């Protein structure tokens, strides 16, 4: 699982005091070798905003889009079912207001998420309650079609437990507790994340030009590998002398709901994209003003239903000879 970088600064802090201290201590080991870090400044100066935050990236978390119900929940303390999808991986004793806790629940307790529209889901990430007594020893992810996926023992101290799914299209899923520790009084979860699939490989791919002689053709951008020239050119798309104005199009046979695009530029030091525009079949478009190096460049936007999208390159580095991409991912359903 990857994690977001600098753009998380304005988002809510979601780490406990202990996690923040651990992150600071780790960062200070690095900072000892970087004279640009103001280690003596309060809260490490400009670096402070990142210490109390940690947000995952890659596939998009859609748990907070669901309606949430549970076998029971402690409404007196605010540890209700919806706290399991509030985006905060926290719980008692650090902050009990950001977790779901049952009322004397154990094995057989459950949490169900329901969406109003279908979503293609690739994985579920579970965070157990962080206290030392209430522990999930075994659990199960249940899908509406009857399939089930065991979780094993959930990680402790905010360690995520990842359950992979076979790109299942669904409108609901349930986490059921199968076994708990002997000390458990009120089982629950600090957080559950439900991550959508990459639907780019489902699309037909076309481009302004492609290097067919070297195998660097358009559909290599959806082959699941972000590699490229000089190590593995067979995994990237390269144009033939293309620069500004070059484009790549993904087209789906049926309408798809999309909410995020991740763009991996070609990895060689010469061919670099600086700016681009994403255009969609619904008539909307989004400027991509800055490309991450190294990538991916992550473009988040309001979900929209489309049948195609086009990436048009509007700026390249002076050394670019053959612009292109190593990979493009589209998260949605």
Image: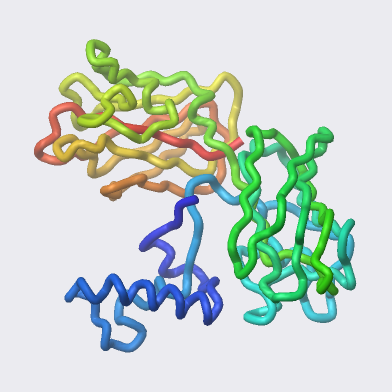
Which residue is rendered at x = 85% and y = 74% of the image? Answer: 185
The percent coordinates of residue 28 (x first, y second) are 32, 77
Farthest-out residue, top: 213
The percent coordinates of residue 87 (x first, y second) are 60, 63
Left or right: 278 as drawn, with respect to 290: right
> 239 above or below 126?
above
Farthest-out residue, front: 182
> 270 above or below 54?
above
Instruction: Decide if residue 64 is in sight here.
Output: no
Q: Nearer the viewer, residue 272 or 39?
A: 39
> 260 above or below 136?
above
Which residue is rendered at x = 69% and y = 78% of the image? Answer: 92
The percent coordinates of residue 159 (x first, y second) are 59, 63
Q: Nearer the viewer, residue 125 or 265?
A: 125
Instruction: Decide if residue 209 is in sight here.
Output: yes
Quadrant of the image occupied by residue 168: top right
Numbered marks: total: 0
Q: Nearer the viewer, residue 24 or 193?
A: 24
């Amino acid at each position: 699982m990857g994690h977001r970088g600098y753009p998380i600064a304005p988002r809510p802090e979601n780490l406990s005091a202990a996690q923040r201290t651990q992150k600071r201590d780790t960062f200070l080991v690095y900072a000892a070798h970087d004279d640009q870090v103001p280690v003596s400044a309060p809260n490490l100066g400009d670096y402070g905003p990142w210490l109390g935050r940690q947000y995952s990236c890659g596939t998009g978390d859609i748990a907070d889009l669901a309606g949430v119900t549970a076998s029971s929940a402690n409404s007196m303390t605010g540890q209700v079912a919806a706290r399991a999808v509030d985006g905060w991986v926290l719980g008692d004793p650090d902050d009990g207001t950001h977790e779901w806790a049952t009322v004397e629940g154990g094995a057989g307790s459950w949490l169900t998420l329901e969406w109003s529209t279908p979503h293609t889901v690739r994985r579920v990430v579970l965070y157990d309650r962080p206290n030392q007594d209430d522990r999930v020893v075994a659990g199960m992810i249940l899908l509406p079609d009857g399939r089930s996926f065991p979780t094993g023992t959930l990680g402790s101290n905010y360690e995520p437990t990842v359950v992979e799914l076979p790109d299942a299209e669904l409108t609901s899923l349930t986490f059921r507790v199968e076994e708990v520790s002997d000390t458990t009084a009120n089982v629950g979860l600090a957080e559950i994340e439900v991550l959508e699939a990459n639907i780019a490989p489902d699309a037909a791919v076309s481009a302004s030009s492609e290097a067919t002689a070297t195998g660097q053709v358009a559909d290599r951008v959806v082959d699941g590998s972000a590699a490229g020239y000089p190590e593995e050119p067979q995994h990237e798309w390269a144009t033939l002398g293309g620069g500004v104005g070059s484009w790549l199009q993904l087209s789906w046979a049926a309408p798809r709901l999309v909410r995020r695009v991740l763009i991996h530029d070609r990895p060689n030091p010469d061919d670099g994209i600086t700016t681009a525009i994403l255009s969609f079949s619904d008539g909307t478009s989004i400027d991509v003003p800055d490309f991450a190096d190294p990538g991916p460049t992550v473009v988040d936007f309001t979900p929209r239903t489309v049948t195609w999208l086009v990436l048009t390159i509007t700026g390249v580095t002076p050394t670019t000879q053959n612009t292109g991409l190593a990979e493009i991912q589209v998260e949605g359903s």
